[in-house]
Image (cartoon, rainbow, N blue to C red):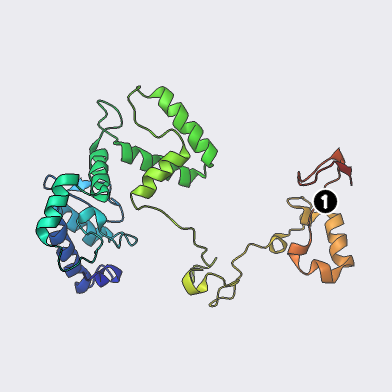
Amino acid sequence: MDKSWMKKRRGDKEYFDGVVSFVKFASLHAHGGKILCPCTKCVNLNLVLPGVAQAHLWTNGMLGSYTHWKFHGESTAVPTAPECGSSHVQDSHEQYGPPDGAQKFYKMIDDVNKPLYAGCTKFSIFSAIIVLFQLKTLCGWMNKSFTMLLQVLMDMLPSDAKLPKDHYEAKKIVRDLGLGYEKIHACPNDCMLFWKENVNLEACPCCKVSRWKMNEASVTDDGVMRHPANSDAWNLFDTTHLQFSSEPRNVRLGLAADGFNPFEIMSTTHNT
């Protein structure tokens, strides 16, 4: 099945025709006359009419990571021996039921429309989790604080609410939907991504800016100590040992310690 259209621009005719072909294919496996919309905003969470999904894909674009259309009827091709007739496959299906992948898919479809708790009309289980993860990203919450929030919400909501109990369980639900993520460094000037063949580069090949944030580049001299590099002792060390201080990662701050372990990596306490 040709999927090259997914990499085309939304204004290209090839992309336009590809969306039409995809929606026709997905409609053959519709659930109650509706399909999951794989646009960049719905991300396979919303059941919509095929025509609505087609409009979304034209407007918002196709979810780039969704290359295996497992929610729309595409299955992994498995070679079969010539002597295995269709009757054998049908008998096996009737005897053992649908494969595990299909059962998992049907459960996801049900959970998408299942309310967060009885009588809830604003959030389904999945939409609530996605909204909470969005807030976690925007506000920079730690995993521990996210788990604490889930526990508080479970105490506030009715007893039949179906929120996950912790961050790990919530992340697993999202990962099962095929919505995993990978952190990718970008050039500070937005020239490129440090990805694929460029993943090990130390600087942008276009503007030559380092991918790393260097402390020495932000040293100020306004009389306010914002970083140890602003201190007199740090500057004296830099001027005394020029070769050593030329590499900023060589210098480590040593705290004045009186009988305790400043970095918690030593087996015994000491004085420095």
Q: Give x and y (percent) for residue 177.
A: 33, 49
How many numbered tags mark residues here? 1
Residue in the image at 84% along x and 42% along y: 268
Q: Is residue 228 visible?
A: yes
Instruction: Give the secondary structure at mark 1.
Output: loop
Question: Please, which residue is most extreme toward the front here?
Answer: 83
Residue 194, x across and y down, in percent: 51, 68
Q: As drawn, which residue projects farthest toward the bottom? A: 206
- Horizontal placement of 96 versus 42: left or right? left
| Residue indicated by mark 1 | 254
Q: Nearer the viewer, residue 107 or 119?
A: 107
Residue 61 place in picture, x, y as percent: 27, 61
Is 9 displayed left or right of 188 in the figure? left
Q: Residue at x 25, y 47 (%)?
A: 105
Q: Quadrant of residue 153?
A: top left
For the N terminus, give its image quadrant: bottom left
